[in-house]
Image: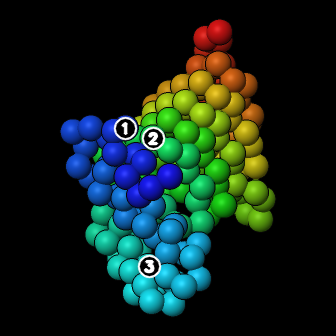
Amino acid sequence: MGIFQDWNANKRNFKGRFVLVLFRMAVAVKKNKILLVFLFPYLIFYRFCVEWVLGIEITWNVSIGKNCGLYHGQGTVINPGTRIGSDCIIRQNTTIGSKGDGAPPVIGNFVDIGANSCIIGSIHIGDHVVIGAGSIVVKDVESNSVVAGNPAKLLKRTL
């Protein structure tokens, strides 16, 4: 897995490509103690550029699988420790976080997260799930589901 593993998932989306390449580089620097010694200033650059300038909070302590699509990105917040599977789409103004001291969410593969959604708590989102725009997800979601609303409710099964 390289720093360009999300390139094809963000075709015609320069901002998504830019942020995810910077993210993958920050993860590589953080994981390699030798690189960390020499490239620590890169982590400061990453936080400044991505968080302060672009308004996207994705720390290097987030685990994101390959082929992640980051559409628009503005206002996106993903808590440290969150695990996101492969081939997921994350849209603008999405919050993925924990409740207080609880564990952050675990999101499966092929999950499409709509704009302005909140996924909060120590929950599990299965594979092949669509989360509608503006949804507040506070309970586990089974694989092959479409959910929406506040709180999010099952609209249909897609199997």
**Residue 116 in view:** no
Q: Which mark is residue 67?
A: 2
The residue that disc 3 covers is 43
- Looking at the picture, tell me which residue is in the foreground, 11 or 79: 11
- Are the residues at dot 1 and dot 2 in contact (C-beta closer than 8 Å)? yes
Q: Position of residue 45 (x, y in %)?
A: 35, 79
Cα distance between the residues tagged 1 and 2: 5 Å
Q: Secondary structure at mark 1?
A: helix
Give the mark nearer the N terminus: 1 vs 3: 1
Residue at image position (55%, 39%) is 86
Mark 3 surroundings: few (<14), some (14-19) or many (≥20) residues within 10 A: many
Mark 1 surroundings: few (<14), some (14-19) or many (≥20) residues within 10 A: some
As shown in the figure, which amino acid type bears the numbered disc 2? Asn
As shown in the figure, which amino acid type bears the numbered disc 3? Leu
Q: Position of residue 96 (x, y in %)?
A: 58, 50
Residue at image position (74%, 34%) is 140
Q: Quadrant of residue 50?
A: bottom left
Q: Would you say 43 lies left or right of 85 here? A: left
Vertical comparison of 51 with 11: above or below: below
Q: Looking at the image, is mark 2 or mark 3 nearer the viewer?
A: 2
The residue that disc 1 covers is 9
Image quarter in which the C terminus is found:
top right
- Looking at the picture, tell me which residue is in the foreground, 146 or 2: 2
